[in-house]
């Protein structure tokens, strides 16, 4: 949740003013930022898949990361295609030149940060360490990076950062505890079985049930934050998916993708409001430019929902499922 808002805020704060100076409509520039930000919830390392793995009873985090990478890249490609088409139609500047050597300089400076992704994802996928061990490695590596290499973090900043970490950890642990209690309560009252019978009673067709659950998750995502939604609804919906023969990794990717859409969807989607605020435009001014992005994002959703191999080929290729 906070990572996605930070993505919208930090990137949008730089990108939208630059785009406006190049003649781009501020509403459209803000829409590009808003539509692309949720990819951070799909492309590893991401806590959303770790929460799903916990809620689902041990689905492979490495497989979720690999499949989520494919889904996130496809989301991004869809947004890029929409941006290209709209920019060409409106005669916006599409290609930019940079000073000689600038691209190389920026790339070299970014290598240490990008190595974190390689270390974490590669380590988990190869089975070198677990997701919990990876989080500790990420903390140490990031501290060294920000304090020694980039020198953007001071020792005096550590107490406030540690306090924020404790608060966030407490929130996550509380959510895990309450979701476990809720799952237990639902199991002894037979709610999952009743809900399963109700949904499966709609149709015997697997494709129809997948569509029903997709619509349900889109609605839930528009009103609930992604963390609680994962922890509450995974224990309810996963047994239904199991009856349909849907792989838990595939369903996890479908679920996170749906809920990620909710983060930029009215009425609650905070990414939408943060993006509009950063772009210094009204929410109404970004809704219309967002519509074609929604179309591309939903199109990718249907592809990954009904063609499982799109997201499962990479985990299988890597031998992690």
Image (cartoon, grey):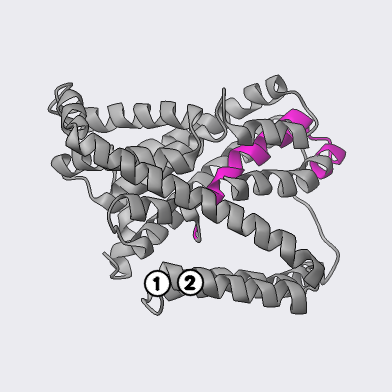
Q: Is residue 101 or residue 18 the one in the foreground?
A: 18
Q: Residue at x 50, y 33 (%)?
A: 262
| Label 1 crowd bin: few (<14), some (14–19), many (20+), radius 10 Å | some
Q: Give the structural element (helix, strand or loop) at label 1.
A: loop
Q: Residue at x 54, y 35 (%)?
A: 263
Q: Residue at x 28, y 70 (%)?
A: 319
Where does the image place residue 223, in percent across and percent down from the top left?
49, 27
Identify the magenta region.
Answer: 18-44
Q: Main secondary structure of the magenta part?
A: helix
On the picture, is 260 further left or further right than 215? right
Q: Is residue 223 or residue 160 the one in the foreground?
A: 160
User: Can the viewer see residue 154 in this picture?
Assistant: no
Where does the image place residue 285, in percent across and percent down from the top left?
72, 22
Vertical position of residue 159 compared to residue 108: above or below: above
* Distance of label 1 from label 2 (alpha carbons): 6 Å
Image quadrant containing the N terminus: top right
Q: Is residue 239 or residue 26 the one in the foreground?
A: 239
**Residue 229 appears in which quarter of the rendering?**
top left
Q: Give the structural element (helix, strand or loop) at label 2.
A: helix
Contact between marks 1 and 2 (CB within 8 A): the answer is yes
Q: Residue at x 12, y 27 (%)?
A: 204
Image quadrant containing the C terminus: bottom left
| Label 2 crowd bin: few (<14), some (14–19), many (20+), radius 10 Å | some
On the picture, is 161 further left or further right than 267? right
User: Can the viewer see residue 286 in this picture?
Assistant: yes
Residue that numbered label 2 is attached to: 134
* Residue 287 is inside the magenta segment: no
Where does the image place residue 179, in percent across and percent down from the top left?
36, 43
Residue that numbered label 1 is attached to: 130
**Residue 205 appears in which quarter of the rendering?**
top left
Q: Is residue 49 or residue 312 the one in the foreground?
A: 49
**Residue 160 appears in which quarter of the rendering?**
bottom right
């Amino acid at each position: 949740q906070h990572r996605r808002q930070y993505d919208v805020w930090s990137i949008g704060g730089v990108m939208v003013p630059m785009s406006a100076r190049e003649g781009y409509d501020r509403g459209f520039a803000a829409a590009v930022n808003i539509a692309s930000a949720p990819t951070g919830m799909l492309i590893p390392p991401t806590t959303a898949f770790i929460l799903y793995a916990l809620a689902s009873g041990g689905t492979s985090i490495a497989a979720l990361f690999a499949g989520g990478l494919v889904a996130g890249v496809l989301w991004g490609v869809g947004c890029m295609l929409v941006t290209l088409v709209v920019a060409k139609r409106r005669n916006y500047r599409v290609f930019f030149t940079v000073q000689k050597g600038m691209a190389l300089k920026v790339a070299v400076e970014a290598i240490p940060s990008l190595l974190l992704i390689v270390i974490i994802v590669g380590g988990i996928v190869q089975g070198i360490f677990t997701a919990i061990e990876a989080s500790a490695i990420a903390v140490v590596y990031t501290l060294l990076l920000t304090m020694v290499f980039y020198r953007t973090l001071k020792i005096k900043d550590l107490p406030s950062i540690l306090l924020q970490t404790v608060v966030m950890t407490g929130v996550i642990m509380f959510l895990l505890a309450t979701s476990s209690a809720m799952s237990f309560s639902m199991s002894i009252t037979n709610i999952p079985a009743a809900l399963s019978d109700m949904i499966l009673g709609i149709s015997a067709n697997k494709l129809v049930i997948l569509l029903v659950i997709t619509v349900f998750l889109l609605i839930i995502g528009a009103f609930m934050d992604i963390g609680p939604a994962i922890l509450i609804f995974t224990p309810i919906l996963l047994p239904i998916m199991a009856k349909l023969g849907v792989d838990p990794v595939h369903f996890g990717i479908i679920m996170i993708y749906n809920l990620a859409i909710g983060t930029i969807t009215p009425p609650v989607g905070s990414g939408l409001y943060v993006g509009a605020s950063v772009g210094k435009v009204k929410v109404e001014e970004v809704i219309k430019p967002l519509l074609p992005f929604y179309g591309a994002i939903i199109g990718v959703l249907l592809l990954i929902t009904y063609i499982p191999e799109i997201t499962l080929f990479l985990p299988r290729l890597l031998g992690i499922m």
